[in-house]
Image (cartoon, grey):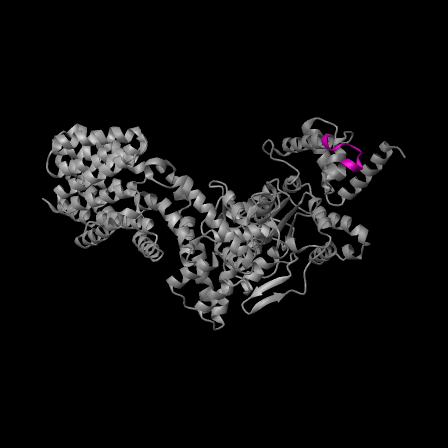
Amino acid sequence: MSDQSERGNLSKAWYQKVLQDWEIDRLLTDLESKIQERYRQNSKKDLLLGLLCGYSLTKISQDLYRDNAGVRVGLSNIYRDIETLTGEPDNSVRSSNLIYILERYGYRRGVAASSTESTSIPHNLPSPTYTEFIGREADMKKLLERLSPKHGAHMITVHGIGGVGKTALVLAAAYLCLEASNENSSDAPKFDAIIFTSAKQKELIPDMILQRQQGQHNLREIFRVIANALSDSTIIQSPPNDQFDRVRQCLSKQRTLLIVDNMETIIEDRDEVIEFLYNLPICVKVVITTRERIALLPISLRNLPLNDGLQLIQQQAEEKGITIQDEDSSLLYDRTGGIPLAIVYALGQVSSGYSLNFVLEQLASAKGDVARFCFEESVQGMKGEPPHKLLMSLAIFPDAPIQAAVAEVAGLTSDPDSVSNGLVRLQQLSLVNLNPETKRYEMLSLTREYALAQLAAYPDFEREARRRWVRWYLDFAYSYGGEDWEKWIHYNRLKEEEGNLRAVLYWCKNQDHYAEVRDLWLLLNHYANLYAYWDDRLDWLQWLTEQSERRGEWSSLVKFMIRKTWLLIRECSPQSLTQADEILQRAWVLRDHADSCVQADLAESMARLRIRQNNYPDARHWLTVEEKLAIEANLDERQHIRYFIPVLYHRAEIFYSEGEYFLTKKLFQDVMKSAEKINWHRVINSAQNWLADIAIEQGDRDEAQKLLIQGLTVAESTNNKRRLARYQRSLARWERRWGSVQKACQLSTQAINSFERLGMTRDAEEMQTLLDCP
């Protein structure tokens, strides 16, 4: 038989099949009348018949012996003809909504145009496990939009880790569609049938993980569910090889929502199941829930936001007759990471008689029901492989890390492909998420607790991973930390890693790794003091002082004593100045253990202390000692300038206190010139503040304002809170003298609050005095 004869027979068979459900003759006549073209003698007729049969583009192409591209063009022309016939907007008709549109205009038998008659559609949806679906408004809106016949989506995936609420979201949407379909309302997409299939093997209930006896784990079982839902026994009665076509034929007669729950647990016939779903008629919408990310219009579910999570906790507590305080609700949300199933499980345990503290402890256990249900199945198949190493390494970081850090800690830097592939695999399983803005890998708190438990189960790997973790951050701090006059522009990189850097310090301290804490702290000292303002700096310095003395590391001891007094002098209370004096006197006795540069720093600290004690003659003596020590150090020009600037700076500060504004101004101008030579921007900004204060004292209104505006901008951009507080103080003085008293009070209050947060007691008290003055 020729191809032409075979196509003719196909056309007749398709016509007879379509004639059962469609007013095909009327449709063809209307098309011919509207577009002035003979549809019955046109090849487009066969394409239209194939569409109404529910066939895919591939099947139509194969049966008509035409290439896909040609068929695609022909179908596009049909969609435009339907738009002309019905008056639908341009480019609004497509394969996904063709049947829906033709039904609306009355071309389907038994369906009146724009019908408003209430119906009851077949479905097999399980009963909801909640009285009210909470949260997920944006995800619900997106899912309903894609279920609409006006949207081109055929297959939609909802993915996320176990327990995140994939099934709950899809069922909530399905019930909205069911209500709209039965009542013919317009709030949600309408279907003629809604079918739910699930391959879920386990169910988490408050007492245990329940093994499910039923589940659709292969294609034949899915066919059986469809047959039962549609009350069509001919599907199962057909020979196995014919069941696929029989299902397609049944589904092509109505708009159907088919849900395939827990796709990742379908192992048997997996490829056949995917092929079946992909080739379903265009009138079928398929929604797949899975822990694995599939590139089919995915909707990615993460943990519930805080407010939604707290609302779910209160709802569950009320349903279970539990009273839970706000503080405990917040604690439960934090421990569960906002995972709905973990919240429901935890409160179920509490209602069974367990204490909340016990339940919270069990949530973090790798052997607990929640961890095993949510993660064990995903992690089991990757143990010992790069993805597993990356997962355990990611858990070491309290804050989301960059890829380079994770690769180093996992010991995989020599195999970048395994790193990339492993991280992709973890994302596919929704165990981690890559933040597209920060390029950092984020992990939910519950996932991290499980991964940390996994890490503890592999002590050899953890020991090496921790060692690499510490080494990576030491190298990182060496690159971006250190003295602020050299590397301050890189401190923003330290800010990004601050939480992880602190975690390294605390872990090393707890493990008594003194050398690592010593080296890391010396690299981070200026950042912590000038930009981060860690409130536990004195505690760290006390520990380092004790440890260095115990080990007889006298050179390090002198360094830590200097850094501790730097903070005590800045606090400037009588008690802190007395303590600083005692420490510096002892450090001076130990000075021979330190090099000339450290001794110069020690002399500068002595001068700073004497200035705060208003002992200017002794302060000048120590500045002379500092200058001499810097000269004896035989430094290169850049280093010499670095050590010479503090001498000028503190001499100028003394002159200011003595009211010698002309000499003060000259010295601070020299400070700025010297600092500009070595790009010491913090000192430039500080000297500019002093020059503004001098201008205020000398009554130079415009010069003071110009210097303050310029300096304040720099202080804000560099996040130097100490300098910002001092600029606020100077601006308050300017406003009180030349501007608004109200603004002066506002700035004074801001400065006081800043000084108090920084522990600068005397500055706060002096500012309060200015604020209290009439």
The quarter holding residue 327 reads: bottom left
Horizontal arrangement in the rendering, residue 103 relative to residue 357 (left or right): right
Horizontal arrangement in the rendering, residue 737 relative to residue 296 (left or right): left
Residue 467: give x, y in percent of width and height.
49, 52
Q: From this viewpoint, is residue 758 visible? A: no
Residue most toward the right? 1
Residue most toward the bottom? 353
Residue 552: give x, y in percent of width and height.
34, 55
Question: What residue sits 36% from the left and 46% below the top?
Answer: 522
Q: Check if residue 606 falls in the magenta segment.
A: no
Residue 736: give x, y in percent of width and height.
14, 38
- The span picked out in magenta is 61-69
Q: From this viewpoint, is residue 146 visible? A: yes
Horizontal arrangement in the rendering, residue 269 relative to residue 513 (left or right): right
The quarter holding residue 166 reads: bottom right
- 1 vs 203: above or below: above
Horizontal arrangement in the rendering, residue 660 relative to residue 492 (left or right): left
